[in-house]
């Protein structure tokens, strides 16, 4: 018998999740939430086609999620959206760490000094997951809402985080990456990425020169914890005309200073 008060993450003898142990209805519900998160409103017909399920099945899933406020609908547009409870639940992920809380004032200060949007991101499964943003007051500005993702090799924060990888981990990442090309400037080869990592380490900050989106640039630096581990990245991003070559070094130093200050708040030496 299990000792009183003892807690387990999964039943005794259970391994990691597999198709044999998954719950189909729950799996389908998560598919629906992920599809809604990827669209700015989607109709029942579009959702059914997107997931390859019948409209009747999709409606039952949506109705169940709607009762719990994980999704909501617009009767006028006949479209479905992610609901407030999904946001609340997702926010629990951010609450696991105090990085966002410790970073907000520095991000606001960085935006004020540079006039450009400040972003905070962490690494998850070969991507940058954006967890916080302080937007520029400019009409034309970069926008990465919390929850948005971008490949490591094609983003400022991603390249900053990659520069903190040791050689073994970097080579493992390279072998597992297909280097999706988004623009003509996207890093698309292992050799080019290695060169970029060397340059980033030398500068102390990374530089995304329209590698994800034409007309947008980004400068980023790593945030370290008390164990000198890279746990996040901070960046500023904006239109290329407002981030010309002549300003990149200045902005890089400001971003690096911001990263160092947040790192100190997290206990880094």
Image: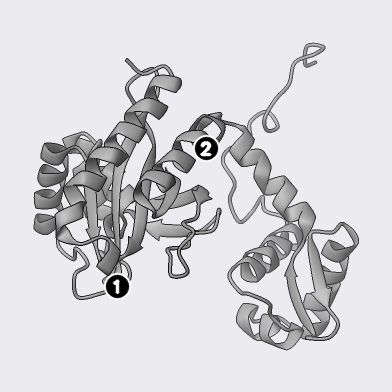
Q: Nearer the viewer, residue 107 or 115?
A: 115
Between discs 2 and 1, the one toward the N terminus: 2
Where residue 197 sits in the image (x, y, percent)? 15, 46
Farthest residue to the right: give it.
67
The local crowd at label 2, few if under 14, some if 14 to 19, many if 20 or more residues have their Cα within 10 Å, is some
Q: Residue at x 56, y 41 (%)?
A: 16
Secondary structure type for disc 2: helix
In the picture, measured across the screen, residue 193 lies left or right of residue 141, that is left
Q: Secondary structure at mark 1?
A: loop
Q: Which mark is residue 215?
A: 1
Residue 148: x percent and y percent?
A: 51, 59
Q: Is 204 left or right of 156, judged from the image as shown?
A: left
Mark 1 nearby-residue class (10 Å; few <14, some 14–19, many ≥20): few
Q: Position of residue 13 (x, y in %)?
A: 63, 31
Drawn side of residue 55 relative to residue 216, left or right:
right
Q: Which residue is mark 2?
A: 104
Q: Residue at x 9, y 56 (%)?
A: 191
Position of 154 with respect to 144 (left or right) is left
Q: CA distance from mark 2 to mark 1?
A: 27 Å
Observer-nearest residue: 29 or 148?
A: 148
In the rendered image, the quadrant that contains the N terminus is top right
Q: Residue at x 80, y 13 (%)?
A: 5
Residue 82 tag number: none
Residue 49 lies, with reference to residue 32, above or below; the image says below
């Amino acid at each position: 018998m299990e000792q009183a008060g003892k807690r387990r993450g999964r039943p005794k003898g259970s391994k990691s999740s597999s198709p044999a142990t998954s719950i189909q209805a729950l799996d389908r519900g998560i598919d629906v939430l992920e599809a809604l998160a990827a669209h700015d409103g989607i109709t029942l017909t579009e959702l059914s086609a997107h997931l390859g399920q019948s409209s009747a099945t999709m409606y039952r899933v949506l109705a169940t999620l709607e009762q719990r406020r994980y999704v909501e609908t617009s009767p006028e547009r006949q479209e479905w959206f992610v609901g407030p409870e999904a946001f609340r639940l997702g926010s629990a992920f951010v609450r696991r760490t105090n990085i966002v809380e410790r970073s907000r004032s520095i991000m606001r200060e960085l935006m004020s000094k540079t006039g450009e949007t400040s972003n905070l991101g962490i690494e998850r499964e070969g991507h940058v997951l954006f967890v916080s943003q302080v937007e520029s007051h400019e009409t034309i500005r970069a926008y990465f809402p919390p929850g948005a993702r971008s490949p490591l090799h094609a983003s400022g924060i991603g390249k900053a985080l990659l520069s903190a990888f040791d050689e073994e981990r970097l080579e493992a990442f390279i072998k597992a990456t297909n280097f999706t090309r988004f623009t003509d400037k996207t890093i698309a080869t292992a050799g080019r990425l290695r060169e970029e990592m060397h340059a980033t380490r030398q500068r102390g900050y990374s530089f995304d020169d329209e590698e994800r989106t034409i007309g947008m640039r980004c400068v980023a630096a790593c945030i370290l914890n008390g164990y000198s581990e890279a746990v996040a990245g901070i960046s500023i991003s904006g239109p290329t005309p407002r981030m010309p070559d002549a300003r990149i070094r200045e902005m890089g130093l400001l971003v690096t200073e911001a990263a160092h200050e947040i790192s100190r708040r997290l206990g880094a030496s």
